[in-house]
Image (cartoon, rainbow, N blue to C red):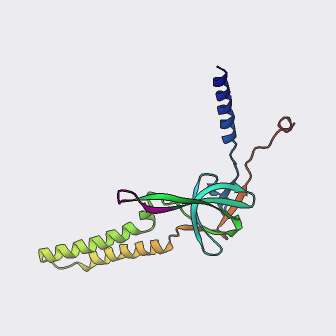
């Protein structure tokens, strides 16, 4: 019975220690001071620093002057059966200052092919090909007005793709702010 009580007490202590994770975060905001995305421990992030190096990983910890990114070195290794499997060779913890970050990659949404114009380009090219093949098969003339409309859809999709940015550039439009979210201890807890 004593052992069970000791194990239970240790389990509760371990759970309490694990629950004391850092609550600090870095918040990406636009020029209207609206929060776009919050980055804290456990959130995946892809960004470029001032040297141009693109870093992708999981935020491990955020402190006042540093963001710690956990990266894994995953490689294909041979098995004893002659096949290959992906295996984690190592894990690295990289430290960056928030001022070093130049841009952060946007997360892809489910409607991204519509927003970046890919659907319009595919639809326009598909329609022009279908119209040309049907006209040749049926022996009818190609209607250039239909091809012009399809070309307009392709051009609109191309313009949308060029205007659509897949990253948040830190500077004039977006800022990266540190938020200290650790709870303040009361006078009773300090004693």
Nearest the viewer among 187 and 10 is: 10
Image quarter (top left, top right, bottom left or bottom right) of the N terminus: top right
Q: How many marks?
A: 0
Residue sitting farthest toward the top: 1
Q: Position of residue 102 (x, y in %)?
A: 64, 70
Q: Position of residue 172 (x, y in %)?
A: 67, 70
Q: Position of residue 119 (x, y in %)?
A: 37, 66
Quarter assignment of residue 147: bottom left
Q: Can residue 45 be seen?
A: no
Image quarter (top left, top right, bottom left or bottom right) of the C terminus: top right
Residue sitting farthest toward the front: 80
Residue found 82% across the figure and 36% down from its top = 189
Residue found 56% across the figure and 67% down from its top = 167
Q: Is residue 69 left or right of residue 142?
A: right
Q: Can residue 108 be seen?
A: yes
Residue found 60% across the figure and 52% down from its top = 42
Q: Is residue 107 left or right of residue 16?
A: left
Nearest the viewer among 75 and 144 is: 75
Q: Is residue 136 left or right of residue 55?
A: left
Residue found 74% across the figure and 52% down from its top = 180
Quarter assignment of residue 57: bottom right
Q: Please give the range of residues in magenta.
A: 74-83
Q: Is residue 189 magenta?
A: no
Q: Position of residue 10 (x, y in %)?
A: 67, 32
Q: Is residue 188 left or right of residue 182?
A: right
Quarter assignment of residue 96: bottom right
Asked if residue 83 is positioned above or below residue 3 in the image, the reply reads: below
């Amino acid at each position: 019975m004593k052992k069970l009580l000791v194990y239970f007490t240790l389990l509760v202590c371990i759970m309490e220690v694990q629950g004391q994770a850092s609550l600090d975060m870095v918040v990406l905001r636009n020029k209207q001071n609206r929060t776009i995305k919050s980055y804290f421990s456990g959130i995946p992030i892809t960004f470029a620093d001032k040297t141009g190096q693109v870093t992708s990983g999981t935020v491990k910890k955020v402190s006042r002057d540093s963001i710690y990114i956990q990266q894994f070195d995953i490689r294909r290794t041979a098995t004893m059966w002659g096949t290959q499997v992906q295996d984690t060779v190592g894990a690295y913890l990289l430290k960056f200052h928030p001022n070093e970050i130049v841009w952060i990659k946007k997360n892809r949404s489910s409607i991204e092919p519509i927003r970046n114009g890919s659907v319009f380009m595919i639809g326009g090219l598909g329609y022009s090909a279908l119209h040309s093949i049907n006209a040749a098969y049926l022996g009818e003339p190609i209607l250039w007005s239909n091809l012009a409309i399809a070309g307009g859809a392709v051009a609109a999709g191309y313009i949308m793709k060029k205007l659509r940015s897949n990253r948040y550039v830190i500077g004039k439009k977006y800022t990266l702010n540190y938020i200290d979210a650790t709870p303040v201890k009361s006078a009773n807890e300090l004693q």
